[in-house]
Image (cartoon, helix red, strand yellow):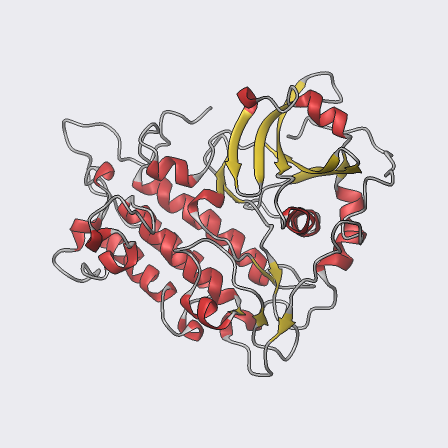
Amino acid sequence: MGCFAFRSGKGRSKSQPAPGAKTAPAKSPPASDSSGGVGQRSKASSASASTPTRSIQELSEERGAQRLRVFDLDELQSATNGFSRALKVGEGGFGSVYRAFFRSAGGGRVVLAVKRLNQRSLQGHKQWLAEVQFLGVLEHPNLVKLIGYCAVDSEAGNHRLLVYEFMPNKTLDDHLFNRAHPPLSWRLRLQIMIGAARGLDYLHEGVPEVQVIYRDFKASNILLDAEFKPKLSDFGLAREGPTEGKTHVSTAVVGTHGYAAPDYIETGHLTTKSDVWSFGVVLYEILTGRRSLERSRPAEEQKLLAWVRRHPPDGGGFRAIMDPRLGGRYPLAAAREVARLADRCLGKNPKERPAMRDVVEDLERVLQMEPPPPPADKKGGDGRPPPSVKR
């Protein structure tokens, strides 16, 4: 990415609104729908933007205009060969992602990712705008980098596109659950979760002007670069945290089934601890190699959290939940510690869930625990990246 430079000084046309601008067909979404009652902030929130001075929209209008490039639709069509199916690398409810080829300032070829929002999606513009606003302001090694955007309204249709850095190793979801990929080692699983935790900690406590609640933490939103370093992606559901004197944000319940905190589902009250609960779910996914919900399994095993509760970390049957693809190559004591941490993240009382900064510290400590020696007749398990890593 360092060798890539766009030509500067490109102006915006009427079809290319500045981030946060109020344009048809939808107005800029408010950072949060409403705020909760007055109360004392929890420990996790007290250090993070307890007195926010700016909104994401204000910061986006100030910083996003400097950081983000406005792309022409024709340029993106050319870079993706007319949005060719052969270059499609992902697809979701809000659109498709394509591998795109651009020319750098030095004449070389640079690969980026282009997300094309589904024109039939009623929430498409709102989510597009949220991504432009948040990623135009936020910057961290464990957040995906937004390069620029494109917005075109015409009689032929409205187009909303985003251009990101390209992540060649796809997602954590792919490597945990798709057998076409070699299994992730124990050490690499922890390293990925530590990076993801750092990303959440930055959102919760690392931005002086504002607190950010991610609201969509799951394995498929953890992208992996060429060295398997994780980066959080898809900020279409992100929201600003509560303002001073408030304990939560009240908003419509959205997210992915199996990852949304039960207290958020029941009340609509959103806090940083909602993200912590989701993180606990993914911790159990890296332990077990199972998704939070798998309809193809026997009835008693379909819901991951209900199943692992029958095998607590301190119980004799704990090994039964561990991912068989690990081949036993993990420190059992470390696995138990990760499960205990997951249980704390999944606590019923949101106030008792740990802050993400504490989660980072706990996982870093677990990473230092000695692994067992590899079996004499097998190779691997030493924390090296799987064969798909590009060096």
The outermost residue toward the left is: 316
Q: Residue 79's image quarter? A: top right
Where is 390 relative to 126, above or below?
Answer: above
In what quadrant of the picture does the N terminus appear? top right
Give coordinates of residue 37: x percent, y percent. Answer: 59, 81
Give coordinates of residue 67: x percent, y percent. Answer: 75, 42
Residue at figure coordinates x 27%, y 47% from the top left: 288
Does residue 103 appear anywhere in the picture? no
Q: Out of 158 and 80, give the one closest to the viewer.
A: 158
Horizontally, residue 88 falls left or right of residue 363, namely right
Where is 197 relative to 155, above or below?
Answer: below
The outermost residue toward the front is: 155
The outermost residue toward the top is: 107
Give coordinates of residue 46: x percent, y percent. Answer: 56, 73
Horizontally, residue 118 falls left or right of residue 74, namely left
Residue at figure coordinates x 81%, y 46% from the top left: 18
Q: Out of 320 and 376, give the one closest to the viewer.
A: 320
Horizontally, residue 313 falls left or right of residue 148, namely left
Does residue 322 appear anywhere in the picture? yes
Residue at figure coordinates x 24%, y 37% from the top left: 325
Residue at figure coordinates x 87%, y 41% from the top left: 14
Where is 380 relative to 173, above or below?
Answer: above
Give coordinates of residue 370: x percent, y percent. Answer: 26, 47
Where is 56 relative to 146, above or below?
Answer: below
